[in-house]
């Protein structure tokens, strides 16, 4: 057994759902109708359903798996407007006024969460702390200097500092004051409880597969079990939109994975949130669990389905924890998938200019606690017929036409084409029967590329590795035991079932003769 396996939990599991009695909901087993159907029970979907129910709307919320168990359940849960080094970029690309709107909108979302927690007395470990970006390289310091200039232009409460309250190597840092973090599952569980008293119907294990718009402006959501929900409005809050509507979202976003360790440390960790901006960097923040401080260490981002074997990313985090945190032990490990738009601004609003009754929220670029909450506020205002001062900034139909954005668009789609071709040419030499327990990889069965995993009990699970979205070949994710698509970020369990879209159908099972 490797040193990695000796020091890591065997299976990925986020800390947030531990030791909690979360509500459970039944499967939708009949056709029904409502005013609004919200698809996806993460922070965007639950907050949207909550807000609309408070407005008196009849709401149904459906979730393909379990509530609060998708991207929201795998977050590091920072409630912050410090979205890496974003503001200098925004000022350069969209101008000072719109960059200010981005900052103000995220501050509004942060304040909304804080107010709701206080007003409803929600016990969700919300703590207000400063957030820091830090650098050790000349390039990183240059980024911080530019970002500090953007802070001044936007009148952001922050400044450059020479020393962090965290004993980690750094040459310069940039602080944004009065930010926060919390326990996202406790927070959203409280909203679910109140939604019950507001009459919101919630269904789990109910996968939305399509939307049909009828002539009387009603939208019909179809589910994988063959049932339909007729609604006046649909809010797609499913991380990746389950319904594209010719919006071609899969061509306008990149899927990126990152990794998290929850660790006990020998030293006391200071308050605050800390994120490096150098090419190889990590992010740190703490949480309180049973009166003890646990540190969340995250990083090792890469494009989904590409790069080194994924367990090596966990190994890199383990190495960093030993070096910088005086590691006691690793309690939990998990990974998260984030969608990044071309201009780094989320898509929130009407699905396309032709869809007045279908709304989308996606592309949060790792900052879903504020932008997911903001999405709910914007979608609520759309449905209630109100103006929202931030709606135009986030509308999915925007196209700034910046040369660097166009260049990146061409590069990413060329990368998709490269992986599509290379995957088709790959002919693995390994046979499924040669796999050890808890081993997975691409194999060849009857001359065709397949994927195989032998579980802890010795049972083989063999699938066709061709992604059911657009036909790229998936790659084995050894860290999470999934098949990940390098083209558009779809992910499948070792048995082929869909973990993450845009794919809707499972990988085809293959029987070994």
Image (cartoon, rainbow, N blue to C red):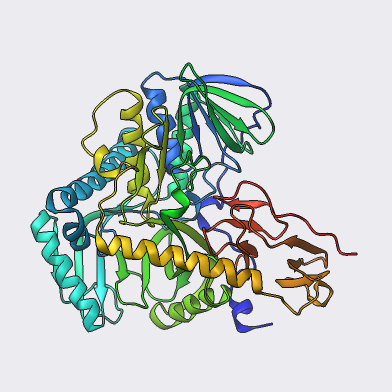
Q: Residue at x 42, y 24 (%)?
A: 53
Q: Is residue 114 left or right of residue 32?
A: left
Residue 89 on image: x %, y %: 22, 62
Q: Going by the picture, which residue comes out furthest to the right?
A: 513
Q: Is residue 429 visible?
A: yes
Q: In the rendered image of this protein, does residue 166 appear above or below residue 53?
A: below
Residue 426 on image: x %, y %: 66, 74
User: Quadrant location of residue 507?
Assistant: bottom right
How many labels, in total?
0
User: Quadrant location of residue 423?
Assistant: bottom right
Is 329 or 382 nearer to us in this picture? Answer: 382
Q: Is residue 506 left or right of residue 500?
A: right
Q: Quadrant of the C terminus?
A: bottom right
Residue 135 on image: x %, y %: 25, 77
Is 232 or 458 nearer to us in this picture? Answer: 232
Is 418 or 21 nearer to us in this picture? Answer: 418
Q: Residue at x 61, y 38 (%)?
A: 207
Q: Is residue 294 visible?
A: no
Is 377 or 360 nearer to us in this picture? Answer: 360
Q: Quadrant of the N terminus?
A: bottom right
Q: In the rendered image of this protein, does residue 150 appear above or below residue 239?
A: below
Q: Residue at x 44, y 77 (%)?
A: 321
Q: In the rendered image of this protein, does residue 383 appear above or below residue 303?
A: above
Residue 187 on image: x %, y %: 42, 42
């Amino acid at each position: 057994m490797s040193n990695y396996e000796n020091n890591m939990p065997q299976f990925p599991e986020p800390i947030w759902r531990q030791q909690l009695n979360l509500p459970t909901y039944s499967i939708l087993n009949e056709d029904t109708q409502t005013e609004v159907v919200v698809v996806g029970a993460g922070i965007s979907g639950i907050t949207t359903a909550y807000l609309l129910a408070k407005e008196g709307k009849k709401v149904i919320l459906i979730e393909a798996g379990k509530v609060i168990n998708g991207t929201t359940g795998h977050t590091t849960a920072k409630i912050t407007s410090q979205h890496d080094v974003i503001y200098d970029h925004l000022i350069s690309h969209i101008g000072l006024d719109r960059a200010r709107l981005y900052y103000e909108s995220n501050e509004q979302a942060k304040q909304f969460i804080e107010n709701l927690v206080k007003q409803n007395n929600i016990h969700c470990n919300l703590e207000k702390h400063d957030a820091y970006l830090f650098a050790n390289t000349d390039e990183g310091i240059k980024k911080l200097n530019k970002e500090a200039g953007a802070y001044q232009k936007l009148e952001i409460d922050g400044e450059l500092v020479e020393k962090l309250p965290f004993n980690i190597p750094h040459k310069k840092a940039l602080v944004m004051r009065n930010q926060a973090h919390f326990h996202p599952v406790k927070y959203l569980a409280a909203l679910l409880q109140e939604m019950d008293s507001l009459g919101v119907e919630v269904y789990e294990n109910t996968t939305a597969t399509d939307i049909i718009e009828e002539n009387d402006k009603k939208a019909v959501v179809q589910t994988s079990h063959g049932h339909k929900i007729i609604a006046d409005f649909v809010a797609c809050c499913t991380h990746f939109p389950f319904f594209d509507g010719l919006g071609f979202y899969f061509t306008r976003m990149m899927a990126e994975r990152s990794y998290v360790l929850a660790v006990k440390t020998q030293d006391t960790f200071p308050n605050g949130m800390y994120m490096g901006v150098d090419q190889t960097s990590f992010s740190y923040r703490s949480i309180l669990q049973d009166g003890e401080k646990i540190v969340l260490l995250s990083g090792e981002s890469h494009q989904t389905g590409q790069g080194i074997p994924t367990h090596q990313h966990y190994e890199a985090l383990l190495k960093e924890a030993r070096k910088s945190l005086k590691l006691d032990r690793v309690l939990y490990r998990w990974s998260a998938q984030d969608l990044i738009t071309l201009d780094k601004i989320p898509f929130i609003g009407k699905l396309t200019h032709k869809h007045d009754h279908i709304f989308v929220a996606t592309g949060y670029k790792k900052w879903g606690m504020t932008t997911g909450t903001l999405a709910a506020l914007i979608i609520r205002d759309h449905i209630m017929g109100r103006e929202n001062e931030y709606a135009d900034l986030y509308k999915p139909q925007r196209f700034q036409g910046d040369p660097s954005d166009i260049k990146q668009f061409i590069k990413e789609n060329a990368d998709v084409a490269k992986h599509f071709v290379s995957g088709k040419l790959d002919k693995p030499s390994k046979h499924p029967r040669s796999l050890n327990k808890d081993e997975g990889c691409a194999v060849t069965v009857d001359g065709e590329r397949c994927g195989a995993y032998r579980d802890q009990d010795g049972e083989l699970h063999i699938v066709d590795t061709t992604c059911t979205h657009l036909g790229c070949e998936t790659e084995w994710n050894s860290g999470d035991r999934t098949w990940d698509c390098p083209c558009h970020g779809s992910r499948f369990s070792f048995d082929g079932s869909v973990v993450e879209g845009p794919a809707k159908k499972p990988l085809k099972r293959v029987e070994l003769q």
